[in-house]
Image (tube, coloured by chain):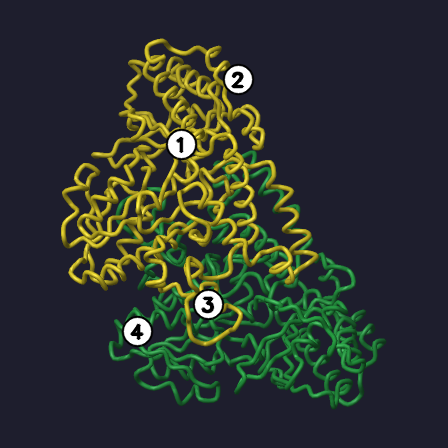
Chain colours: A yellow, B green
Amino acid sequence: MTHITPTLKDCELLDQLDPLRNLRHQFDLPSGVIYLDGNSLGALPKSVPARVAQAVTREWGQDLIRSWNTAGWFTLPQRVGDKIARVIGAKTGEVMAADSTSINLFKVLAAALHIASTDHPHKRTIVSERSNFPTDLYIAEALCQERGLTLQLVETEDIPAALQADVAVLMLTHVNYRTGAMHDMPARTAQAHAQGILTVWDLAHSAGAVPVDLNGSDADFAVGCGYKYLNGGPGAPAFVWVHPRHIDRFWSPLAGWWGHAATFAFTPDYQPASGITRYQCGTPPILSLTALDCGLDVLLSVEPLGGMAALRQKSLALTGLFMQLVRTQLHGQGFGMATPTQEDQRGSQVSLTRAEGAYAIVQALIARGVIGDFRAGDGGQQPDILRFGFAPLYLGYADVWHAAEQLRQVMASGEWRDARCAHQHAVT
Amino acid sequence: MTHITPTLKDCELLDQLDPLRNLRHQFDLPSGVIYLDGNSLGALPKSVPARVAQAVTREWGQDLIRSWNTAGWFTLPQRVGDKIARVIGAKTGEVMAADSTSINLFKVLAAALHIASTDHPHKRTIVSERSNFPTDLYIAEALCQERGLTLQLVETEDIPAALQADVAVLMLTHVNYRTGAMHDMPARTAQAHAQGILTVWDLAHSAGAVPVDLNGSDADFAVGCGYKYLNGGPGAPAFVWVHPRHIDRFWSPLAGWWGHAATFAFTPDYQPASGITRYQCGTPPILSLTALDCGLDVLLSVEPLGGMAALRQKSLALTGLFMQLVRTQLHGQGFGMATPTQEDQRGSQVSLTRAEGAYAIVQALIARGVIGDFRAGDGGQQPDILRFGFAPLYLGYADVWHAAEQLRQVMASGEWRDARCAHQHAVT
């Protein structure tokens, strides 16, 4: 299949044979749209409207304060965390749904720095990638500034050389938000540990998209996002994981009452709860958390169909198909491939580069119902990017074919040169 | 009215004459329930189910990522903040809805400590009340521990004497969560400022319950809760306010991308946005924020009826009536009054003490449809408390009469001694 260009008919056949084909029926997708932005905001599971309505009308409206017990609101962050654990190689009780990715990153970075400074006081540097997601870099920068530490940003290929004796923490995003390039988590972790360096992983673009094995990788800390491939809805709570060897050694300065050993004892002094509970802080947003719970149920319905391995297989087939169609159908149109073609080096998105017009081309595609997004370059090393996420839960092979075909038509017609390009904000 | 016990008929007449009587029709309250726990979780506004359903089904489900612009998700935290500003004496653009109260407290305490250490490096103490809400104390304790500062907890009456030259910050909750006792914000702030001390106010039990004038009080920093008297739903986002004289002097270590000057420029280095925007961190939970937006619309509908002053007048009348009924109808039943009887010293709740049985009495009342809550004492100075919140938006005089009458019957019958007392968790 690498040399023959698949036809629409081929793709429709692949869809018919796809063992995961029925999962898309669990989503409510708008008609006439091919949604390739699930890496930014996942689609709406059909179960959400009724479940959220129940949380609003019955749990809040009728049962009121009692719902903290009767509807299980108290335990919801932990129960949602336990569901997330199943797709990131963590155990029950190791993951908590809480706050935002940025805030959870602050918690685990603070914990990692505390542990590093206790065990190895001379280690005073955080290493990360210059191309890491900005909020990760901002949080690390602020912590370093406050504590007189150094944040060292390097290119991907320079990571191994940067893992020197003075480094306390290696902080990486598993799948890069721009390029979709994926780190080898076990290998990177082993490299870091060999130098006594702790690892902090951001799983924003990998949880629910690619198999992750935190315990198997011997990782130290992880955070991730609820509103991308977990389909938890806009601004859904994020999650946090800490390896059991670290969990009881520290609590973050975000020492709120929900992380207390006895929240409702209302004691004036802080005693952290044991385990991941101490990584909670304040009262969780129940309505948003309820939607995330539904999103996870849909994701976990893949378990009897082969689980994350089956999802990964399909994801690779979808991204591989798109890459192939770009190569054959869009040859000579000026597109470069920002995403690694080697399967074990990419996540579930394909990013194309183009010297000019990337933004207008994305707009022209959106006008045709193919929703991807644009990420500006820095005018230097980082090029402009057209970003296409392939969420294997609700996309099929024919979708990919149509998306590539629409892109071909946009380029063949030249319509992108006329596209009305009102500036688009987008959330990664 | 202070010496004659009001009858039910009197109370029904007061309801008929109440200019705010129709506001309760904007809430969906369960039948057969008198809800006196709105200080813990506010009631459901009738507008919420349809509005949240629209956010789920149309904004998320159909418009997907585009809703960040088309549905105004980007600006929702600021717009909700602007609504909150109107009930706490802040100006448009000064308040942001964000995160939880605990996390916002961390942000402003970190900012206050930074400013204090810059202007007066010798000031290295935070003063607060021993009876302050625990999460506030935990956050302060963790910050002090991390930075080698001192957290000094004092009794309320000892606050003035504690405001010594080495104090950097006075951190108080405006209305006490247990007793309902209210601080004089302008006076306390003036006392603090006379010693060069910054003030941090937690408005959890005052925003929407009592008039607050942050700018008029010359306060420095404030945070508060969205799910109590603002009726934003379980775990609704909290809010944060910073006086304009401090706003651009510092950003907190929670330097996430939503507080960046150009969130979607994706630059690797942090540049804080100007104004209160820098007190945002990560992506906000849109569904929960949407419910809070509805809650605020209901609260603001009191503006043409006299605003917070009218609401306060009614609140004082309701709490005063309950106190009077307790004095006359429950005389000799062993109840003490934890809440100040002087009007300018209390919020919108009444807390009763009792040497024994407080928990069982609350349970017996709940069994009769009168929902208040219980707060355990510490076995020493702090007694057990029966806590009754009187949300003036949806409670009337007859409700208060019935609540007191049910309490009278619970005591007269002795049924509370048999009440099944399954342990109740409750969120303040």
Query: Which residue appears at 47% of the width and 73% of the height?
Result: B134
Residues under numbered marks 3 and 4 in contact, where contact means CB atoms less than 8 Å apart: no
Distance between mark 2 and mark 3 Cα atoms: 52 Å
Q: Chain of mark 4?
A: B
Distance between mark 1 and mark 3 Cα atoms: 44 Å
**In the depicted structure, whether residue B151 falls above or below residue B261:** below
Q: Are marks 2 and 3 on the same chain?
A: yes
The kind of secondary structure element at disc 3 is loop
Front of the two marks 1 and 3:
3
Q: Which residue is mark 4?
A: B116
The kind of secondary structure element at disc 4 is helix
Distance between mark 1 and mark 2 Cα atoms: 29 Å
The kind of secondary structure element at disc 1 is strand
Q: B188 or A145, which lies in front?
A: A145
Q: Is residue A297 left or right of residue B311?
A: left
Count of picture labels: 4
**In the depicted structure, whether residue A376 falls above or below residue B145:** above
The part of the image, by quadrant, that contains residue B142 is bottom left
Marker disc for residue A16: 2
